[in-house]
Structure formats: C-alpha cells, structure tokens
Amino acid sequence: MKYILSVDQSTQGTKGLLFDEKGILLKRADRTHEQIVNEKGWVEHNPLEIMKNTLAVCRDVTEQAGIDPADIQAFGISNQRETAMAWDRQTGKPVGNAIVWQCARAAEICERHQSEAEIIRKKTGITLSPYFPASKLAWIMENMPEARRLAGAGQLAVGTMDSWLVYNLTGGKVHKTDYSNASRTQLFNIFELCWDEEICRSFGIPLEALPEVCMSDSCFGMTDLGGLLPKEIPIHGVLGDSHGALFGQDCRQAGQIKTTYGTGSSVMMNIGEIPRLSDKGIVTSLAWGMNGKINYVFEGNLNYTGAVISWLKNDVGLIRSDAETGTLAEQANLQDRAYFVPAFTGLGAPYWDSEATGLLTGVTRTTGKKEIVKACLESIAYQITDLILLMREESGKELAEIRVDGGPTANRYLMQFQSDIASAAVRIPELQELSGMGAAYAAGIACGLYDPDCIYSHVAYRTYQPDMEEAIRRKLYSGWQNAVHQALTHSSE
C-alpha cells in the first residue's frame, strides 16, 4: 500500500492527515499551539513550536495507522493564510514570533499607505488592510533591528507559514511559496504573476528576502520529516487553507463555488484562468497554479456566521446547545418576519462598513424566542447569499450548486434555508478535512499516485435541493436587504 501524508497547519493547531492510495483518509493526529496575545491585543504564534508540532503530528499519525513510513510517497501542506514572519536564512532562527493574520498592529502603516490603496488593489486584487502580510512585514522591518541587520547582510528571509515549513522541512535548503499564498500577501501582482517591485519598495520589503513563487503542485524540495522517513520524499502540494478546501471540494472548474462555515465564513468561487477585479466588495486572488495553469478566485469573508450561534448560547442565553437552533427554528412561526443583522463589529463583505451596528428588526407580537433564534440562524444564510449572488453577477456564471463544509453544515434547517434562499443545491461532503485533503490530493496527483479524473469518486455527499416558491424567496430576501440597509443607514447617522 502507498500513502500520501499532509499537514493542515491552521490558526489553532496542526493536523497530520494520512491518505491511502485511493485518497481515503485513514488517520488524523492533532497538536494545538499557544495563542500569544498581549495587553495591546497583538496576536502571535511561536514558529518553532509550530514546526515542532508539524513533525510531531506526522510521527503520531503514521504510528496510529501502523504503517511503514517508507510507503509514504509525497507530502502536502495547507496552511493558515496571511500569518507572516521573518528569519535568518543561514541559521533558521526566527526574528521574533509570527504575526498572526488576526493581528491589527500594522493598522497605522496601512493608514500611511492610503493614497496608494487603489493602485495596490488593482495590482494585487485585495483591499489595503493590516489583515494582509504586506503591512505586517513592514512592521517587522520598522520595529525589529535584527531584521534590518539581516537584510543588510543578505541573510533575511520573510514569508508566510507555508514557506517557513518548507524551509525547515528541507533543512534550510529551500525558500519557496505557492501562488495561492503569494496572492494573499498584498505584495504579489496577480496579473504579472510576480512580486511587485513598486509595492515591495513602498512597504520597505527587500525583494531578495521573499520566497520564490512556484506552482502549487510543483516540487518544493525533499524532506525526511525530521528523520521519520528512511528516505526523502517530495513536498508536492502547497496551498493556503481556503484554497486547499476549494481543491478538496473539487471546485476545479470556473463557476464552481464553495463556502466554509466556521466562526466566520469564507465564500470562494473559481473564476477560471482570466483574472477579474470587482468594485463591489469582493476580492480577487489566485486559486492555485496546477499542471502549468493558473486559476483565479473571487472571495468574500464574513466575520460572524457560526459566531452568531455562539452569541445566542454564551452571551444572551437563548439556547443551551448549538443543535437547539435547528429545532427551535423548525418550531417557529413561519409567518414571522423578524430579521437579525449580526454587525457586532461592523459588516464585512460586500458592505465593508466597520461602523455598522447589529440590529433585530421586524419584531411583532408573534416574535418570541423561537422566532429570534430562527432570525439569527437565517442571518448566516442571508449573508452568504449576498456574496454568492454578487459573485454570480460579477463572474457571469450560472450557479446550480454550492459546495459547503464546516461545523454548522450539520444544521438541517440552516442548510435547507441556504439552498432555498440562494436558489441552488447545497452539497456537503461526508469528510470535513477539506483543506488538508486538498493539499494531499494535489500532492498525490503531482507524484502520479492519484488520477485527477477519479480521485474524488469515493467521496460521499448529502445534498439539499431548493424547495421554496420564487415569490416567497424574493420577498424574504428583499426583507433581508431592507434590514441591512437599516444597519448601514444607522451607522452613517
């Protein structure tokens, strides 16, 4: 038997995933890492701890499966996006901790670059924000003398978490990243497919410190996984986690779309080999580079989807468990027209109003606990539908199906309502490790173990079909749009 091993290095921890020669997940092992948050709210990770955990989960998962490590053919990586760091290219010693994507310490740097914001967006496809690595790396260059010293000596390496893992797994021989991760740095020109010299110069990032950008399925070097393997194998699939999930969902054709439901949500549509920019609140990134070709995506990120359920449970005490939301929503008065807009810290895509505040509107005498829970649950589907409809409009692609993953997909009421309000089938895979699976499949295809036309055939799905009259759907969605307008109007008063 031959195997593919991958790691999904995420914000909260690192997973090791072992797949057999049919692409079936055999075992999973997990290690969490410390979330380092100081009194200013800065968020960091210890890159040495993450590297240690990466090797540990590889060892754990192979031992749990009881396989001969010599039978592992290739290695794949999916990683938390936008987390950035710097290190000594010669010694491998980090210049401080990694700055996590959630950290907004570089907001002032972005303010200084506001006059360049539109130029940056038109080159990189994304809106200027401290969320992205450009300003994070600029912060490192401005605030860490060791980074400047290493840059002067030609020894500085900077990058995202994937390039740090590749560097260490190859014994410091390789400094590479893939197209998906590069496109999220806000330093990469997605049209010319190279680091943008003007943007790098403006942010004070030395070009020579950045990793080489490669196809996502290329060979990123050889590794023995810290001595676990008797011989080195190729690192073949490297993808940002959302891109890995897109590949894991088999969204390889233009017009296919996936939604990940978590605390927030990422909605991503494959738009094919020709990049398009949207002026309506969604960003453009590279999906990946595979088999010598580039694919682009539209992406929208929502701050509060699954977090709405947590708010109902932990903050207002209307429910005791997540599962209660579906039961209560099914029991609610279907004629009630309460809407909830979860703008706890403003509204994200496609509205981008940081001053908007949440509201519960349309409340009548029929509105009770069940109806409020129903409105909160439906707000998740409405927000995602906003992005789906916008992507359909901007891409010109018809949409018959949404491929979804994440914990809230277990909620039957939510999934049926999502299908109804978006007027599209909703397809949920039985396996939920989509990011790591995408990286593993990319690696397996690249090394010749997996047939790209057959590898997804074993994956089981359950599907929800739209079952709502069009007139009702339009009326409900119009009510949602009015509620959002109230939130936006309130923010400008």
Image (spheres, rainbow, N blue to C red):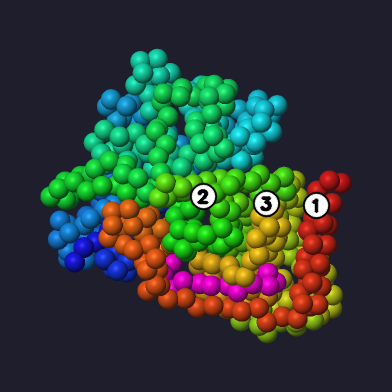
Which one is in front in this view, the residue at disc 3 or the one at disc 1?
3
Between discs 3 and 1, the one toward the N terminus = 3
C-beta proximity under 8 Å, tags 3 and 1: no
Q: Position of residue 16 (x, y in %)?
A: 31, 57
User: Looking at the rendering, in which quadrant would you find the N terminus?
Assistant: bottom left
- Quickly name the residue at label 1: 488
- Amino acid residing under circle 1: Leu
Verify CB contact (< 8 Å) between mark 2 and mark 1: no
Which residue appears at 70% of the width and 61% of the height?
389
In the drawing, does residue 291 fall left or right of residue 187? left
Q: Is residue 321 above or below residue 285?
A: below
Tell which of 390 and 347 is nearer to you.
Answer: 390
Residue 428 on the magenta span: yes
Disc 2: which residue:
295
Residue 227, position as x, y percentages in the image:
16, 46
From the top left corner, tell me how far across and down residue 137 is, in percent.
Answer: 49, 30
Given the current orientation, which residue lies at the most extreme left position? 230
For the residue pair 13 and 447, the one nearer the viewer reads as 447
Which of pointers 3 and 2 indicates the residue nearer the eye? 2
- Which of the 4 image quarters holds residue 26? bottom left
- In the rendered structure, which disc, 2 or 1, sits on the residue that comes first in sequence? 2
Q: Position of residue 179 (x, y in %)?
A: 46, 42
Residue to which mark 3 is pinned: 349
Above or below residue 104? Residue 449 is below
Amino acid on which disc 2 is placed: Asn
Using the rendered image of the protein, determine whether residue 414 is visible from the camera's viewpoint.
no
| Secondary structure under the numbered disc 2 in the rendered image | strand
Query: Which span of residues is magenta-colored?
Result: 421-432
